[in-house]
């Protein structure tokens, strides 16, 4: 009995001396697993939330993906094809390492972008989660940036959290640092990754910046079941489809709005109350077409709030019209979080078409007869502020 007790004591001591895997050990293990992936198919569900919001803002959107790792592509790292979740036989979008394309099955054409005159240091395509997470881990293990990491153990899974301080970083495979006037100096880029212990594969990721948070959940993954040679985009749509080139052009209004009557409209506010252009009583009215998740749109809010206060004794009214989201509860939270002191309406297709709004923000300034006196595209702090104030002062 005494020998048994001694044996058990020694065994307990040995077990207690076995060190638990460190954060680095776990990350290296996951990295090794990701390095072995050459191809994958999976479903990906995406959803987003507004700045400062902890609940979902947009409706979940599920897509079916095929991914083929392509080491020679230093910008994306993989070839991809995206399909509708309900019909995985019809490819909707693709990227083959040279061009991206969108397939229009109704009108039977394919629009391709060969990235001519491409202004960005990355490519605007769907970035697969596996190569993206691989680069996040490689960055974490080697960077000298100011970062903070945490690893939470939930028994059957891990959650790895990375915060990058004072930088607005996207992982378009390699980390891309975005620097412009819309990025706050104290920006924190945060990435949370959930990893299954059973296979060391990531299955969920949350990416958070000052203006938006994205959630992605990966399900029904099949790894290394197809060969990259199988992916030739033209095999997945009829050869009778017309192929047209995407044309990249400057952001310009399609027509000269100034001096013309503003198109009439009737929309609902977030309390389901009808608001129309005719019902606005201000001598001068400014319409701001906006989108939750648009950085410049979000940056303009403090100025607009001060603008309303400055002209509260004048005959001026500001109306913000949301064009990106139809989630009323999410819009309410966004309005309340930003303490908006102006009307906030939800756009419909009719007003976006009549005002030809394709990109935001856009500001339309109208006089008392509802004639458009100025249209300002985009937002640049101070410069746009001054433009707007000058026009309003001329009209008040």
Image (spheres, rainbow, N blue to C red):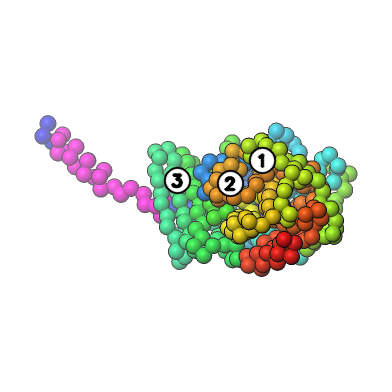
Q: Nearer the viewer, residue 267 or 185?
A: 267
In the rendered image, which quarter is residue 98 located in? bottom right
Q: Name the residue under label 1.
A: 269
Q: Estimate the x, y position of residue 91 in percent, counting from the top left.
A: 75, 42
Say which element carries label 3: strand
In the rendered image, which quarter is residue 176 located in? bottom right
Q: Estimate the x, y position of residue 50 in percent, counting from the top left.
A: 57, 47
Which of the two discs, 2 and 3, labels the residue nearer the N terminus? 3
Q: Is residue 11 magenta?
A: yes
**How busy is the neighbourhood of tag 3: few (under 14 within 10 Å), some, or many (20 plus)?**
some
**Residues at circles 1 and 3 in contact by the CB criterion of under 8 Å:** no
Q: Does the magenta stretch include residue 186?
A: no
Say which element carries label 1: strand
Residue shown at the point (45%, 49%) measured from the top left: 160
Q: Is residue 214 above or below residue 307?
A: above
111 with respect to 38 (left or right): right
Q: Mark 3 points at which residue?
A: 159
Residue shown at the point (66%, 40%) measured from the top left: 269
Q: Which mark is residue 60?
A: none
Q: Estimate the x, y position of residue 93 in percent, counting from the top left.
A: 73, 46
Quarter of the figure that contains the N terminus: top left
Q: Nearer the viewer, residue 255 or 277?
A: 277
**How busy is the neighbourhood of tag 2: few (under 14 within 10 Å), some, or many (20 plus)?**
some
**Camera sees residue 305:** yes
Q: Which of 68 and 355 is in front in this view?
A: 355
The residues bearing labels 1 and 3 have C-alpha atoms spaced at a distance of 40 Å
**How busy is the neighbourhood of tag 1: few (under 14 within 10 Å), some, or many (20 plus)?**
some
Q: Mark 2 points at which residue?
A: 335
Q: What stretch is highlighted in magenta?
A: 4-26
């Amino acid at each position: 009995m005494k020998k048994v007790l001694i044996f058990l004591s020694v065994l307990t001591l040995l077990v207690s001396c076995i060190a638990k895997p460190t954060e680095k050990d776990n990350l290296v293990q996951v990295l090794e697993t990701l390095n072995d992936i050459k191809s994958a198919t999976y479903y990906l569900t995406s959803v987003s939330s507004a700045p400062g919001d902890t609940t979902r803002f947009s409706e979940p959107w599920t897509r079916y993906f095929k991914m083929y790792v392509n080491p020679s592509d230093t910008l994306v790292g993989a070839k991809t094809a995206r399909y509708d979740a309900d019909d995985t036989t019809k490819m909707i979008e693709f990227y083959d390492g040279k061009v991206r394309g969108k397939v229009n099955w109704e009108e039977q054409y394919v629009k391709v972008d060969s990235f001519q005159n491409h202004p960005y240091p990355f490519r605007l395509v769907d970035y697969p989660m596996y190569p993206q997470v691989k680069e996040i881990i490689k960055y974490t293990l080697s960077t000298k940036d100011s970062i903070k990491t945490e690893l939470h153990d939930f028994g059957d899974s891990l959650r790895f959290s990375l915060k990058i301080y004072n930088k607005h970083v996207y992982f378009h495979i390699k980390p891309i640092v975005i620097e412009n006037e819309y990025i706050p100096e104290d920006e924190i880029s945060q990435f949370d990754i959930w990893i299954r212990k059973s296979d060391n594969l990531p299955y969920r990721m949350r990416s958070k910046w000052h203006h938006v948070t994205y959630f992605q959940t990966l399900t029904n993954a099949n790894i290394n079941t197809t060969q990259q040679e199988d992916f030739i985009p033209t095999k997945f749509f009829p050869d009778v489809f017309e192929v047209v080139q995407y044309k990249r052009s400057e952001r310009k209004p399609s027509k000269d709005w100034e001096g013309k009557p503003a198109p009439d409209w009737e929309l609902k506010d977030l309390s389901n109350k009808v608001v129309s252009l005719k019902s606005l009583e201000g001598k001068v009215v400014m319409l701001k077409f906006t989108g939750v998740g648009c950085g410049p749109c979000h940056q303009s809010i403090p100025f607009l709030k001060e603008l309303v206060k400055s002209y509260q004794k004048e005959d001026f009214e500001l109306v913000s019209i949301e064009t990106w989201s139809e989630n009323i509860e999410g819009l309410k939270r966004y309005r309340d979080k930003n303490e908006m002191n102006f009307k906030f309406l939800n756009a419909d297709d009719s007003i976006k078409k009549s005002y030809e709004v394709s990109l935001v923000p856009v500001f339309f300034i109208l006089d008392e007869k509802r004639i458009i006196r100025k249209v300002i595209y985009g937002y640049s702090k101070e410069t746009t502020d001054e433009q707007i104030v000058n026009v309003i002062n001329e009209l008040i």
